[in-house]
Image: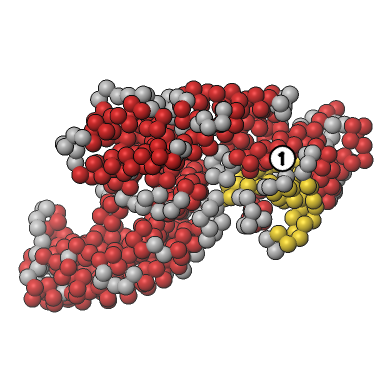
Amino acid sequence: MSALDLLESRLASNQPITIDDLGGVDEILADADRLYAAPFLDILADMISAAPPTEGARLHNFLVDGFDAARDPQSFRDAIDQLIRSATLRAAMAQAVAAIFTRRIREHATEREALIAAYSFEGLFRLALEGDVSRHRPLLELAEVAPNAPGPFAQHVAKIGGAAFHAWGDDDLLTMLHRLLDNEEAEGEAAFELGLAHLARAFDGRDVVTVLAGLDTARLLFERACEADDDRSDARAYRLAIDLVLGFAANRSAADMQDTLADLVTAARDRATVLRTGCVTPWLAPRQDVDVEWFELARTVQRAANDLSRPSWINAATTMDRIFAVYDASCTIAHGDGLRFVLRPRVEASFLRERGLAAHLDDLLSDGQWPDVQRMIAQNLRTRLDEAYRAGAGPGKAGENEQYPLLARILPEGTSTEQIPSDMARSLEAGLASRVAHDRELANPVLQRVLASLRDQLSASSEYTGEVQQAFDAVLQQILIFCSDRQNAGRRDLGSRGAYLRAHDPSEADLQSDLRDFLKGNLVGAEVLSEVSGIATGRTDLYISLGGPSFVIELKKHEGAFSPDAANRYRAQAISYQAANVRIGFLGALELVDRLGPVPSIEECLWHSAYVPEGGSLARHLIVFRVPGRLKSPSALR
């Protein structure tokens, strides 16, 4: 019997396989071509790795040629795993096999070749992680991956690219992942890996602005992964965890975050179910550990929000452990210290406000039973509180005053919002905000609902706060009124200025002129300019300045339905004007469609869009709107 026949016979009887069982080295070499054609490369690799050194060494070249000739993807991948696990095989074969992997990476014309190419990429990456080949070899191959690569191959490469970024931190990997966002089958995986990369960068931030911007970008990418693939429970869990962390930083109550926490628990459970159905490869196992730690921190944050709203605790030691997990998040998550800038202000403000909590801290510091790590965190917190007391208004107070600007404005001089219970401060701030908003509230309840929805979506932007938010809201409200009015106003209402809305082939300039005049007349005190040059090396359609923040409105004439997908083709140009400005703007279109029925509702004419440009790390936000053209009277519709 040949070596292949002997191999198949022993497999059929579920017996172990050795070199002697297949007739010896010479018989194996004589039957090499048939063995290569069979799906048993992994079994041969296992046999050779376990063989006596002398016999095994004689088959090293045989195994190298097997990797070169293999046609079965699964046995090829399992053989790579055997190779990586054996230091002897790696030492003897790594360079030769790496050359084969490099060649096979570029061969993916068929589905089978695409899988083998993907597993070759994995093999080359794992050899680099082990130090058997230079990391520049997989990095060079990753840099060459095209956005139109076959789906299964591109998905696998996106996962490897993300793991490589966390191992080596090369920015070219993020550029490659951005390219794969244009690959329909790999978009979800690429967006998820980019989200993890930007989350890690947020953790490494050195100030609160950088950290919040990084979390904003990461959240946007996780949301995109969910949109690309409904089954991405991992992306959903990460997005919800970020929401909890940002909610804590924004002083939201535990009750306000309860639904988000429940959704996170469901997503994490779904993710665990997926992982239990398969095996996590060793090179991804450390990331799974970080998943668990990050989600646990997010759950702890929600409970800590409830703890910090109380004047004292019954079980102070256990509760303080939770607070410390939040206060010193870097001890929980194996990344940088950036989260401290986001989470610490609320903790410190609560201890400043509630002297009972500070008393708990002092009692526990006097207890000699605390572990050294926790004692160090407690002493750091105590030091920060002492500094705040000596200064009269420490970081926590300042943070709370910034959190409740309207309330802080009406308090007597020398009074801080930290002296008011957080639930009461939050309620008062909401009431004041409602009173301010009432002065410019829209009469139409549908427009109110659209405006509220858009503002809620914009809250993901770290720049949509304070003066920028107030200025942008003023422009947004007028854009909404303009879109509504141009659908409702008749010929006699608008006169000649509205003629373009019923013309068959109007120009983009017609919309530009109409919108400029509308904004100029309604935004009192604003400077509304058209065709401003010297912005992002081009000219803006409309440039709006309200003294401080300025915004750009990019306008287009679009033949056909102006859907979110259609709007994406203009997105890069629209956000380019944000490069040296506030990262929020507008994209509008005059939509030219020969409709038989009515135009879209106002709720379908405005939406939020966010985008991270290739090579960038900060999300840019747009409010997109469409103004339907070629209008007909209701009596002319079918």
Name the amino acid type tagged 1: Val
Q: Position of residue 384 (x, y in %)?
A: 36, 42
**Apparent side of residue 125 relative to residue 620 in the rendered image (left or right):** left
Q: Position of residue 23 (x, y in %)?
A: 9, 70
Residue in the picture at 55% in, 50% down: 619
Instruction: Name the quarter where the C terminus is drawn.
Output: top right
Q: Is residue 490 visible?
A: yes
Residue 587 sits above or below residue 129 on the image: above
Q: Is residue 302 visible?
A: no
Q: Position of residue 268 (x, y in %)?
A: 35, 37
Residue 442 sits above or below residue 21 on the image: above
Residue in the picture at 68% in, 41% down: 471
Q: Position of residue 258 (x, y in %)?
A: 41, 27
Residue 436 sits above or below residue 236 on the image: above
Residue under label 1: 475
Instruction: Say what secondary structure mark 1 lies in.
Output: helix
